[in-house]
Amino acid sequence: MKRLKTSLLIVLFSVILVPISIAQDWAGLDHYKKENANVVDITPNEKRVVFMGNSITEGWFNIHPEFFGGKFYFNRGISGQTTPQMLLRFRADVINLKPKVVVILAGTNDIAGNTGPSTLEMIEDNIISMAQLAKANNIKVILCSVLPVYDFPWKPGLEPAQKIIELNKLIKAYALKSEAIYIDFFSAMVDERKGLKAEYSQDGVHPNEAGYYVMEPLAENAISQAFGAPKPVVRKPVVRKTAVAKKTSATHKTPSTVSTKKTVSTKAPSTLKAPATQTKPVTTGKK
């Protein structure tokens, strides 16, 4: 009887502990472990880019892999993830791959509450932390707007539309402040309800192929900008001044005419003033 009870206890504990051990990889560090181990060292001229995100990023590769083909683009999206999870795996899935650029698309699952309640400021803090980690490792940062959502199918009634607009304002403001590049997917894909246009999604959250076709040129332009030439140095215009011509006023006296026959007193003509010399306008600067 005692042996039976002991066996039952062992079985019970094993049933409880197995899910716990699986759930310990909360950040998904194992998700791309094999792929990361097979990544070769970056070459000097390689334009390596890592895409960090959630199911929208992961689905990008699944739905339109051609966008990633033939390029040094590494997709590190994990479905359902929130920004604190991405922050925990940022070193393993981004920094250790030594990319030149990282594209961060995150925040919608935080608003949905996938890993618990989260304020907009908390989401912003996590995105800023990822951006700071990237910059500290000489990785250029591209921050993406959160895509529009009218309602989450798995958590209806949260009214995320306005929250996403406010979060995007925070992300854009930080991008401008930190000299990161900002991609505005939102404006290109939003409908009159402040949700995702029906032609770009089947569920109102995740883009379909048409949706990714809208996103791709915006992403490519941002990546090109990140790899582009440095900003030109703005030089102050040189003001060239033209010397002002001085006015000259000369008085010419005509001598008296002397007659040999008879001295006739003739009045000298009126003093003639030379016409005033026109001064050239002072050039104050180039137009």
Image (tube, rainbow, N blue to C red):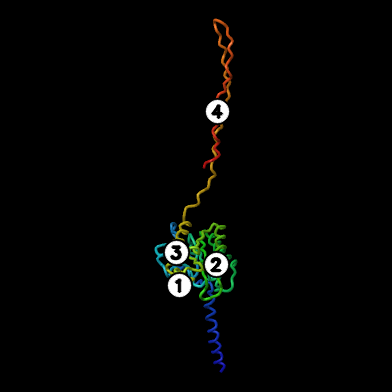
Give the crowd class for mark 3: few <14, some 14-19, many >=20 residues within 10 Å: some
Indicate the position of residue 271 as horizontal and vertical percent values: 58, 19
Q: Amino acid at mark 2?
A: Ile
Q: Secondary structure at mark 4?
A: loop
Give the foreground label among 4 and 3.
4
Residue with the mark numbered 4: 277
Which one is earlier in the sequence, the residue at label 1 or at label 3? 1
Q: Secondary structure at mark 3?
A: helix
Q: Amino acid at mark 4?
A: Thr
Which one is earlier in the sequence, the residue at label 4 or at label 3? 3
Q: Amino acid at mark 1?
A: Gln
Task: State the separation of the CA atoms marked 2 and 3.
Answer: 19 Å
Residue 62 left/right relative to 181 = left
Which one is earlier in the sequence, the residue at label 2 or at label 3? 2
Task: State the separation of the CA atoms marked 1 and 2.
Answer: 19 Å
Residue at (57% x, 25% y) in the render: 248
Q: Are marks 1 and 3 in contact (CB under 8 Å)?
A: no
Residue with the mark numbered 1: 202
Which one is earlier in the sequence, the residue at label 1 or at label 2? 2
Q: Amino acid at mark 3?
A: Val
On residue 214, which mark appears? 3
Give the foreground label among 2 and 4.
4
- Residue found farthest to the bottom: 1
